[in-house]
Image (cartoon, rainbow, N blue to C red):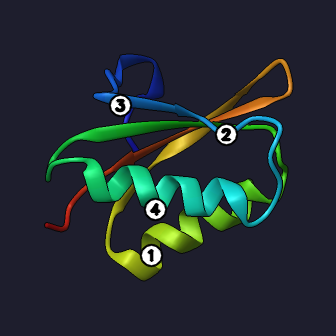
Amino acid sequence: MAELENIKPDITHDATGTYCPIPITELAKVMRQAKKGQIVELLADDEGAIQDVPAWCETTGNEFLGYKEEDGVYIFYVKKTQD
């Protein structure tokens, strides 16, 4: 897993205040707009996203780089690996 502090996201998307399945549908929408190799930072406060984001990455073939939690907000990093 990449050192999260050193990750420089290309796109940041704030999905705080939403609940399953919205953080994942928002992530999917942003990833469709991202270019291959770009890193998306997703902010979410739904605990379900802790399992949902890595599972979505596995299903779609995108690379889950990890997540951290700051003040009740989960910050996920996903690298687009598919065109």
- Give how far apart the Cα atoms at labels 4 and 3 are: 13 Å
Label 4 close to label 3 by CB (< 8 Å)? no
- Give how far apart the Cα atoms at labels 2 and 4 are: 12 Å
- Give how far apart the Cα atoms at labels 3 and 1 are: 20 Å
Q: Quadrant of residue 76?
A: top right
| Within-10-Å neighbours for mark 4: few <14, some 14–19, many 20+ | some
Q: Which residue is mark 3?
A: 11
Q: Secondary structure at mark 3?
A: strand
Q: Earlier in the sequence, mark 1 or mark 4?
A: 4
Q: Amino acid at mark 3?
A: Ile
Of the numbered discs in the image, which one, if any, rests on residue 28?
A: 4
| Within-10-Å neighbours for mark 3: few <14, some 14–19, many 20+ | some
| Within-10-Å neighbours for mark 2: few <14, some 14–19, many 20+ | many
Q: Earlier in the sequence, mark 3 or mark 1?
A: 3
Q: Amino acid at mark 4?
A: Ala
Q: Is residue 29 above or below residue 14?
A: below
Q: Is residue 35 above or below residue 39?
A: below
Q: Which residue is mark 1?
A: 58
Q: Is residue 51 left or right of residue 26?
A: right
Q: Which residue is mark 2?
A: 15
Q: Earlier in the sequence, mark 1 or mark 2?
A: 2
Q: Earlier in the sequence, mark 4 or mark 3?
A: 3
- Give how far apart the Cα atoms at labels 1 and 2 are: 20 Å
What residue is at 83 percent from the left and 48 percent from the top? 46
Q: Give the label, 3 or 1, closer to the camera.
A: 3
Q: Give the label, 1 or 4, closer to the camera.
A: 4
In terms of depth relative to the viewer, which is nearer, 77 or 29? 29
